[in-house]
Amino acid sequence: MTSTTNIPLSVLDLSPIRHGHQPAEALANTVELARAAEAYGYRRLWISEHHNTTAMASSATAIMIGQVAAATERIRVGAGGIMLPNHAPYVVAEQFGTLATYHPGRIDLGLGRAPGTDPWTTRALRRRHESGADFPEQVSELRGYLAPGSAERKVRAIPGEGVDVPVFVLGSSTFGAALAAREGLPFVHASHFSPDQLLQALELYRTAYRPSAAHPEPYAIVAANAVVADTEREAVRTFTTLQQKFLTHFRGGMRVLPPVDDIEAVWAPQEARMVNAMLRESFVGAPDTVRAGLEDLVKRTGADELMIVSEAWDFEARKRSYELLAKSWNL
């Protein structure tokens, strides 16, 4: 287990679109955030996959990864993740093989099975693939295309075969944890929005882990929300943008809204309980406060790495949050 003092931090970017603004702003912010994260010392920046929402611009994940990798020099860039049932594994192998050929040693491939959207868009994406029940088989197929190949193989991913593209399994339940353990792959838990099975999934992952050549030991990444500001009051106010994002999701139309002075005046008690349950692994405050909270998260979970989501209405406040956390963590 990595000690708390030197555990790496990484960034998960959802490319949020501010309500009333255009996706172009969100996409530009993703590139600028990656440059900043690289300068601050974060290990990697991953981009999520979401579809048919006016709140996030991260629909064409592989294209965004290429743009970010081209605009940076050292930071690892990847998918957090590719929702594999939405895609043909062969196409994903070609895309990420191409990305890793352009940017050797810098591309990560996180794989998830959730649709990242609503049921109607899921049908548009998957056509005849109505569920992610065959996710383990799809992961195996994809990894086969990325493995060293031979001229005798009838279907080859070129670029792709034999290219260094580390694969991670994403999940919010024991399903992904069990798959990652069986395949000897790193596991990433989405506790930034689904914390209920965090400890159970990590225990199963470590207990059932089968060592692989690439990963002789289990490697667990835990995602968490962190909003850091110069003062506690400022951080709490900034955090209300994320709280409202989940609130509007429950109300049927997710939006990224400006912060409010009093979140209690915005939601009903039942709504507050629902949002707070989803955002339980969120750490908000001045640098020392957030650092202490994240240190406790590492102790509770034994995480080998933390994947930080920091959302704010104002992009400069968002960058500042990552900057303050990096300094506090001595990145």
Image (spheres, rainbow, N blue to C red):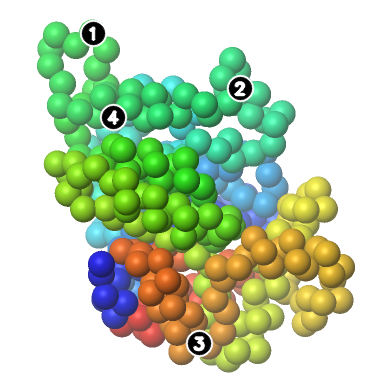
Q: Residue at x 42, y 71 (%)?
A: 300
The image shows residue 86 at horizontal and vertical percentages of 52, 28
Q: Which residue is under mark 2?
A: 130
- Local secondary structure at mark 1: loop
Q: Is residue 302 above or below residue 48?
A: below
Whether residue 120 sits left or right of residue 204 in the image: it is right
Amino acid under label 2? Answer: Glu
C-beta proximity under 8 Å, tags 2 and 1: no
Q: Nearer the viewer, residue 60 or 120?
A: 120
Residue 330, image quadrant: bottom left
Amino acid under label 4? Answer: Arg
Q: Is residue 82 above or below residue 267?
A: above
C-beta proximity under 8 Å, tags 2 and 4: no
Label 3 – label 4 distance at C-alpha:
41 Å
Whether residue 196 sits left or right of residue 8 in the image: it is right
Q: Which residue is under mark 1?
A: 154
Amino acid under label 1? Answer: Lys
Q: Is residue 317 visible?
A: yes
> Which label is found at residue 143?
4
- Local secondary structure at mark 2: loop
The image shows residue 202 at horizontal and vertical percentages of 40, 55
Point out the tag, 3 or 4, that comes first from the N-terminus.
4
- Local secondary structure at mark 3: helix
Point out the tag, 2 or 1, that comes first from the N-terminus.
2
Q: Residues within 10 Å of mark 2 (few under 14, many from 20)?
A: some
Point out the tag, 3 or 1, that comes first from the N-terminus.
1
- Local secondary structure at mark 4: helix
Amino acid under label 3? Answer: Thr
The image shows residue 298 at horizontal and vertical percentages of 39, 72
